[in-house]
Image: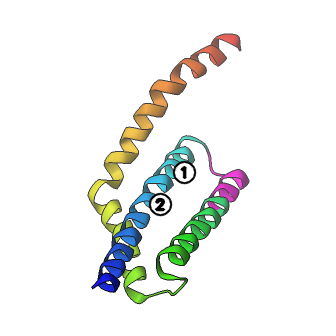
Amino acid sequence: MEQILGQGRYVLASFACGVILMFLYDFILVLRCLKKPGRLSLWIHWLFWGAASVFVFQMIFELNNGILRSFFVIAFLLGMSGYRKAVGTVVQRGIKSIFGVVFRPCVWIVKKIR
């Protein structure tokens, strides 16, 4: 019974991991929309997915002793796609509006200085 509960936690954690990674990736997508993509944008993507892979590996190692199961991959992908379909665009709009409010005074000051 304990083993089944452990695998259930593993599935929930992998689903949550997919949701969290897509939430964080929304910040990168919003920043990419605000600024013209270039080499820095490419490096930020590589760094994000590199850090995400370390995060996912750490979770796999701690929760299931490093054994990769097919239901982990399925739950992870369901978490990512479910987040994207359910609330992805709403969250991106919210992040854009927050960035607009935060950075609008900075843009105004820079325009006044020029």
Which quadrant is the C terminus positioned in? top right
Q: Quadrant of residue 79?
A: bottom left
* Residue 28 tag number: 1
At mark 1, the secondary structure is helix
Please, what is the three-letter code of the amino acid marked with disc 2? Leu
**In this picture, is 86 found above or below 27?**
below
Q: Quadrant of residue 35?
A: top right
Q: Main secondary structure of the magenta part?
A: helix
What residue occupies the far front of the structure in this picture? 2
Label 2: few (<14), some (14–19) or many (≥20) C-alpha neighbours in 10 Å? some
The alpha-carbon separation of the residues under discs 2 and 1 comes to 11 Å
Q: Position of residue 67 (x, y in %)?
A: 51, 87
Residue that mark 2 sits on: 21
Query: Does the segment drawn in magenta span residue 15?
Result: no
What is the magenta range? 36-45
x, y percent for residue 16: 38, 64
